[in-house]
Amino acid sequence: MGDTRHTKVLIIGSGPAGYTAGVYAARAMLAPILVQGIEPGGQLTTTTEVENWPGDTQVQGPDLMIRMQEHAKATECEVIGDIITDLDLSKRPFIAKGDSGTTYTADAIILATGARAKWLGLESEEKFKGFGVSACATCDGFFYRGQEIVVVGGGNTAVEEALFLTNFASKVTLIHRRDELRSEKILENRLMKNPKIEPLWFHELVEVTGTEAPLGVEGVRVKHVKTGEITEIPCKGVFIAIGHAPASELVKDTLATHMGGYVKVKPGGTETSVPGVFAAGDLTDHIYRQAVTSAGMGCMAALDAERFLAEQADT
Ligand code: FAD
Ligand code: NAP
């Protein structure tokens, strides 16, 4: 049997939303506990330069997240390395089970579990995951020094990954299903000017090909979306950068969700469909999905939780 810990506010997630909620809840004297999950620091730990965090012209994503963690700790938010595996929101106090064996009970909960990389869903993609197929250039780019690689996608992540990978690769082919990127213009300009990057418009990846023993990627087969023509591109690495899906597994059956699993919050606020449960950041946001908007929502969630707890104390 593990320990049981009670807290006024349990924060689940350690991205910009979670840590900001931690700072605000701690400064409201709510002595919050923050559970970090499998990816301490969240999505920004998988990138390099962040150039749109106000106050920093340029900051490394992992460094920014360490600073946020230290800030939360300094305000006396208790930061715990654990993963919540089960959440009972049917009565208060709410009950969260930790993978460590600890049970957390809480008067209010702030969900800030963010989002995770999406995959194409191809059998060959699954087969070569970790053996040439990746969704994280920062984590795996180093393995492809002097090699040819492909990146799939047309958003900010795909463009940033393609640019970053030119630090290692001899050539990067950006495969996009349209002929228009949805990334910021400044990134698009950098991409177009980079001699190592070749965009391949109107193409979809249909198969990753490679060797069996040892398991390794040797190329991809791509299809022209209009003509159906199949082309083979030799490469050693395949980076899938087609977006992220909300990490709402814990609450998909207990909270109202929309737009493919995003937790629904009151417009302009962070209240979910269960009183006392608040949600912030990419978990709720299918539009903006930025570090700064997530941090802003983390602040709002802590203020909403504080107000909720004060109202409960009055009744
Ligand atoms: P996340 O950062 O997704 O963090 C979620 C947290 O929840 C993680 O700590 C995870 O461990 C935790 N968690 C999940 N499940 C559980 C569980 N069961 N128990 C406990 N904890 C759990 N935005 C910008 O503004 N500028 C950029 O330059 C930028 N670059 C990016 C580059 C890349 C490669 C990516 C992928 C994203 C980038 N973004 C950028 C977007 C930005 O990272 C996200 O908008 C932001 O991180 C979302 O913050 P969040 O706190 O909502 O969640
Ligand atoms: P995104 O903006 O949703 O873009 C996903 C891209 O992948 C789109 O171009 C989409 O094509 C393509 N795609 C989706 N499903 C596909 C499929 N099955 N097959 C082929 N292509 C597919 O996702 P993202 O780039 O990961 O960005 C997520 C959020 O994080 C955004 O809000 C973004 O602004 C933010 N972010 C910000 C920064 C920054 O500020 N520097 C950096 C990274 C991420 P279509 O265009 O045809 O739909």
Image: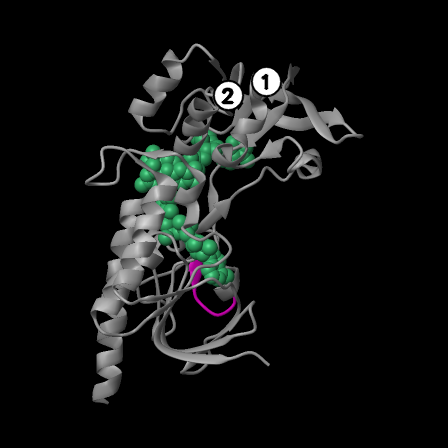
- Residue 276 x %, y %: 34, 75
Amino acid type, mark 1? Gln
In the foreground, 186 or 34: 34
Q: Which residues lie in the magenta part?
A: 253-258
- Secondary structure under the numbered disc 1 in the rendered image: loop
Residue lying farthest to the right in this orientation: 213
Quadrant for ligand 2? top left
Residue 136: numbered disc = none
Q: Which residue is mark 2?
A: 168
Report crowding for label 2: few under 14, some 14 to 19, many 20 or more residues within 10 A (C-alpha): some
Q: Which residue is mark 1?
A: 147
Residue drawn at x 43%, y 10% is 195
Q: Is residue 229 magenta?
A: no
Q: Earlier in the sequence, mark 2 or mark 1?
A: 1
Q: Main secondary structure of the magenta part?
A: loop
Calculate the distance from the C-alpha at mark 2 to the C-alpha at mark 1.
8 Å
Q: Is residue 260 above or below residue 179?
A: below
Amino acid type, mark 2? Phe
Q: Does any atom of ligand 1 lie closer than 8 Å to the CB of label 2?
A: no
- Residue 47 x %, y %: 42, 37
- Secondary structure under the numbered disc 2 in the rendered image: loop
Q: Is residue 298 visible?
A: no
User: Image quarter for residue 314?
Assistant: bottom left
- Residue 107 x %, y %: 35, 79
Residue drawn at x 28%, y 67% is 76
User: Image quarter for residue 32?
Assistant: bottom left
Report crowding for label 1: few under 14, some 14 to 19, many 20 or more residues within 10 A (C-alpha): some
Residue drawn at x 35%, y 21% is 188
